[in-house]
Amino acid sequence: MRTKRILLLTSILVLCKLMIETYYILGRNSEIVQVQDNTFQHNENHAINRTAPHILLIIADDLGFNDVGYHGSEINTPNLDNLALAGVRLENYYVQPVCTPTRGQLLTGRYQIHTGLHWVLWPATPAGLALDNPTIADKLRDAGYATHMVGKWHLGFFKAEYLPTRRGFDTYFGLLSGHSDYFTHVTGNYQEKVMAGYDLMENERPANISKYHGTYSTHIFGSKVKDIINEHDTEKPVFIYISFQAVHAPLQVPEKYTEQYGHIKDTNRRKYAGMVSCMDEAIGGIVEAMKKRGMWENTLLIFTTDNGGNPNVGGSNLPLKGTKSTLWEGGIRAVGFVHGSLIGNKNGGYISNELMHVTDWFPTLLNLAGGNLKGNEQIDGYDQWKTIKYGIQSPRKEILHNIDPLYNNTFYTRRSSLRMGAWKIIIGQLGPGTKRRSSDVDNICLFNIESDPFEQTDLCEQFPDIVQNMRQRLEYYDRGSVACQLPGVDLRANPIYHDGFWQPWR
């Protein structure tokens, strides 16, 4: 009898080992493999009958790699530091070079070649995140979550169907476009035709501007999130997407936040530092509100930036090369971390150097919440939860950084970039250390990011086979691209026709 039991236990252990090894097979050779992998991950997670966590997804605007304390910055970010150092710091994590593409990928789990959102949308641009792309808010609401958004949308609003409240969010408060005055909340359209108006919406109607005029937007957004937390039924899981306007230009902040930075001589950097510290304070207040409601222990907090910092307005990506809007590491390697008791790292946080991309949040959070991927089978993201929680190797082996037919806002200059393992190819992006060749398409750089994270040594001439292989992979992605959305501005959007506000006009 004992021998039979031992044989039975041995068989079970072998079977479990085989299942685990099969599940963690790395790599991807086609989109079909990815769909099957994501479906398997969903089914496994769905079988675990756990309490769905509250989710706080926080995105900062134009925050540079060198703009948080835990990266060695002179900017004080005590709340972000405490959360990051006690969580999982994602130090091989990527976003897009500018904000609209990153936000579209964050909410859909799809590359910009599959959404058509390649560049920033001006307020009067009659385009938006295609309606056939369910958002993570849609899917979490289907899974039983209350869903709220506060802050910057920047995914189009020319028709009411494109508003956040029509894209899965129960409530919305914030600015619809990509930038605004932090105190007056006036936004200008400077592409093709100058137009200006208030940009502050509450659900689907213009906000009472007299109530908010003169109040700093970071304070407004932090307060709104705390209101949501304080009014929430704690028996129901909640998803709050907090999209700060900070620290995007213009450089504006209440003076008290710059007083601690008298040692910073550069005026732009000093104001920018104050803006970062104000945002850090707001995040600390949100965390405290969660704790007071007894929600914090079952909350997962994700922090990310949308792209690299802009040194022209105070940001810094050092020691990385490049800036916002470029394909160098400084434009796309993001500040990001995850914090929460669900990770189980009671002895302190750690650094993950596993490859991760902003599209990965969609399947990661949806599977964790017990949702399903029905209607989103063609996503480009991977479920990274086991990589985050257990530190296992990332299922992601490559990242399409970009295929951008609209670089420099024209159809005549094209750039692209791909990461495969340690290798990164960049085509059409000029910058320090690059050699101008016959055309932008022929201007190719190849870097080994693992050994050369600062992109100092171009290896394209030493490894022509790798260049050829990566170019073929880019061509594969290009064949599956949808048409790029960037029509000319629509004069009918002018706020003078809409009670002085930016709002849907068609």
Image (tube, helix red, strand yellow):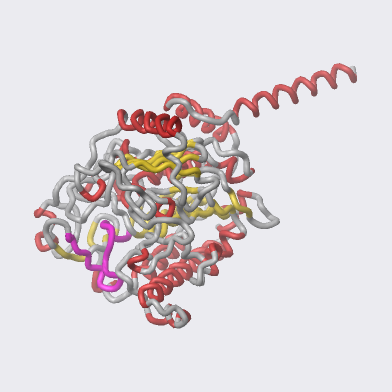
Compare residues 485 and 215 and report the one nearer the observer.
485
* Image spot of residue 413 (x, y percent): 23, 44
* Image spot of residue 203 (x, y percent): 29, 56
Residue at 48% from the left image edge and 26% from the top image edge? 36
Residue 395 lies within the magenta run: no
* Image spot of residue 234 (x, y percent): 52, 55
Residue at 61% from the left image edge and 45% from the top image edge? 389
Mark yes or no: residue 41 visible. Answer: yes
Residue at 26% from the left image edge and 47% from the top image edge? 407
* Image spot of residue 429 (x, y percent): 33, 47
Residue furthest to the right in view is: 2
Mark yes or no: residue 401 visible. Answer: no
Instruction: Name the dominant secondary structure of the magenta segment.
Output: loop
State the extent of the magenta-drawn residues as a range.
Answer: 173-190
Please identify the quadrant where the N terminus is shown: top right
Compare residues 227 and 24 and report the one nearer the observer.
24
Q: Quadrant of residue 213?
A: bottom left
